[in-house]
Image (cartoon, rainbow, N blue to C red):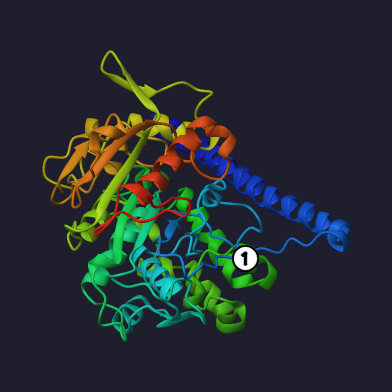
């Protein structure tokens, strides 16, 4: 009887979580569509009398010596050109003239996304690597960028990166690839191509939410038979198999290199993907295994903190302690998409019959969270080896910035407070992004301070 009651509660929670996520996805999609229709109508009405002009999308003035700032989205995210005029970063890219917002696979592995990010900037056809592609069962080559968005990128013309959630870990993997000279035909790369990395709610050490959503705590790779991620897997496979061109142009999960379209694999291939005989969910080459604690440890064991790069992290949390008990910090301030997970993550207990993910693991260390990532995971890389870090209360405390140190600041907010809907964060949105861009422009440089466009020489 007790087991039946527990099963019923779990199914009820799965139903509610699925419904909330589905409704939020529909809200985002419909908001983007409504915005595009409104813009199209406005353009049609005013086109005879009004020419919008301006620069081409994502174009940069090559005469400007300021390093570009590249905003890298997280899981289920999107870049400029997807979902019409909707901005993943809530329009923050408009705060500086030299900002790029790449569109990477929203559910592809961190490795694959790092490869895509390189070719987005440098140009050429995305090369996922021969060995990796054979192991994971997908095409070696992907999207072609006829013209890179920053083809002059090198050690003398480095880049600032700002990553939200898993996007921050993507940049770390990319920097390690640059240091390892892992891009064929680009043997001159090194870690100094990255001038700075700023993370917003960065997933550096994994998250216990992956287990709540359906990853097995035993290995951090396989899925539970009945869970939210199984429903997600089913939906993604169908979406890619149906392969409606205009719909995939509007939003894409990023699995085109797995060739799951009905045109290529037919009905039999669809069945194989659903039964996990083929595709990204069979090989594990998708993002959720990378976001488990075990997966993050596997990634981090190959990643370095580099002495000439500046690192700054904003670690978010939406919990507080009352009499030693961690609970959500309020109800109204937490997005409905995340409230249940904030509560569940604040009460997380690693299964007692399963070996802990690392030596010295304690449940209570992972209770503070923002509804998606545990706060302990966002401050700095600490598993399997802790990297040098420094807590910042006031920004003035860390000036001048020292490279090779992970500065981090604790911010009250849930995981999506600083993306998509800027009105939710209010003034705090501007304070965060103004601080990020000012730090990139005035405090993170290697040789001499950069000359800002409106700066006058005396």
Q: Residue at x 16, y 40 (%)?
A: 361
Q: Which of 251 and 152 is in front in this view?
A: 152
**Outermost residue toward the bottom?**
185
- Count of picture labels: 1
Residue 437 is left or right of residue 355, and the answer is right
**Residue sitting at x 22%, y 70%:** 179
Q: In this view, does 447 lie above or below 216?
A: below
The location of residue 281, given as percent across then percent down, is 42, 65
Q: Is mark 1 on a helix, strand or loop?
A: loop
Q: Where is residue 319 drawn, in percent x and y?
A: 37, 26
For image coordinates 17% across by 46% down, the residue present is: 355
Q: Is residue 255 left or right of residue 25?
A: left
Q: Find residue 448 and report its image quarter.
A: bottom left
Q: Nearer the viewer, residue 304 or 227?
A: 304
Does any portion of residue 379 appear in the rendered image?
yes
Q: Name the residue that disc number 1 marks.
A: 55
Q: Position of residue 80 (x, y in %)?
A: 57, 61
As displayed, is residue 49 above or below residue 428?
below
Residue 277 seen in the current view? no
Using residue 362 as the reference point, say whether residue 172 is left or right of it: right
Q: In which quarter of the image is the N terminus?
A: top left
Q: Which residue occupies the foreground of this view, 361 or 44?
A: 44
Question: In the current view of this chain or complex, which residue is farthest to the front?
Answer: 458
Q: Position of residue 205 (x, y in %)?
A: 26, 48
Neighbor class of circle 1 (other Cα within 10 Å; few <14, some 14-19, many 20+) is few
State the residue at coordinates (55%, 31%). Answer: 426
For residue 439, above or below residue 43: above
């Amino acid at each position: 009887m007790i087991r039946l009651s527990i099963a019923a509660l779990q199914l009820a929670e799965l139903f509610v979580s699925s419904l909330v996520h589905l409704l939020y996805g529909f809200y985002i999609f419909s908001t983007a569509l409504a915005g595009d229709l409104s813009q199209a109508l406005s353009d049609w009405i005013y086109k005879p009398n009004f020419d919008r002009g301006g620069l081409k999308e994502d174009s940069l003035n090559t005469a400007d010596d300021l390093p570009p700032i590249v905003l890298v989205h997280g899981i289920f995210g999107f870049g400029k050109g997807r979902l019409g005029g909707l901005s993943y970063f809530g329009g923050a890219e408009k705060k500086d003239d030299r900002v790029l917002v790449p569109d990477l696979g929203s559910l592809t592995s961190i490795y694959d996304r790092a490869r895509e990010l390189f070719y987005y900037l440098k140009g050429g056809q995305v090369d996922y690597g021969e060995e990796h592609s054979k192991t994971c069962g997908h095409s070696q080559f992907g999207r072609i960028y006829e013209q890179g968005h920053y083809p002059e990128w090198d050690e003398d013309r480095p880049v600032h990166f700002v990553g939200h959630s898993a996007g921050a870990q993507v940049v770390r993997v990319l920097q390690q690839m640059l240091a390892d000279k892992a891009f064929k035909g680009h043997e001159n790369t090194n870690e100094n191509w990255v001038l700075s990395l700023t993370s917003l709610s960065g997933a550096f050490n994994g998250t216990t939410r992956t287990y709540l959503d359906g990853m097995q705590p035993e290995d951090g790779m396989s899925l539970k038979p009945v869970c939210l991620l199984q429903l997600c897997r089913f939906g993604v496979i169908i979406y890619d198999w149906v392969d409606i061109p205009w719909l995939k142009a509007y939003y894409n999960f990023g699995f085109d290199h797995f060739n799951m379209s009905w045109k290529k694999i037919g009905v039999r291939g669809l069945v194989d993907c659903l039964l996990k005989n083929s595709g990204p969910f069979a090989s594990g080459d998708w993002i959720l295994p990378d976001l488990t604690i075990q997966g993050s440890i596997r990634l981090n064991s190959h990643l370095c903190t580099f002495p000439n790069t500046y690192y700054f992290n904003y670690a978010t949390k939406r919990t507080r302690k009352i009499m030693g008990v961690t609970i959500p910090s309020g109800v109204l301030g937490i997005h409905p998409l995340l409230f249940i997970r904030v509560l569940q993550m604040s009460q997380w207990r690693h299964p007692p019959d399963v070996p802990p993910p690392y030596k010295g693991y304690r449940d209570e260390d992972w209770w503070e969270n923002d509804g998606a990532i545990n706060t302990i995971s966002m401050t700095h890389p600490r598993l399997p080896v802790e990297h040098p870090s420094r807590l910042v209360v006031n920004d003035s405390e860390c000036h001048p910035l020292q490279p090779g140190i992970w500065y981090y600041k604790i911010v009250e907010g849930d995981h999506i407070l600083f993306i998509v809907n800027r009105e939710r964060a209010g003034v705090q949105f501007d304070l965060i992004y103004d601080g990020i861009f000012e730090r990139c422009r005035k405090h993170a440089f290697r040789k001499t301070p950069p000359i800002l466009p409106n700066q006058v020489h005396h």
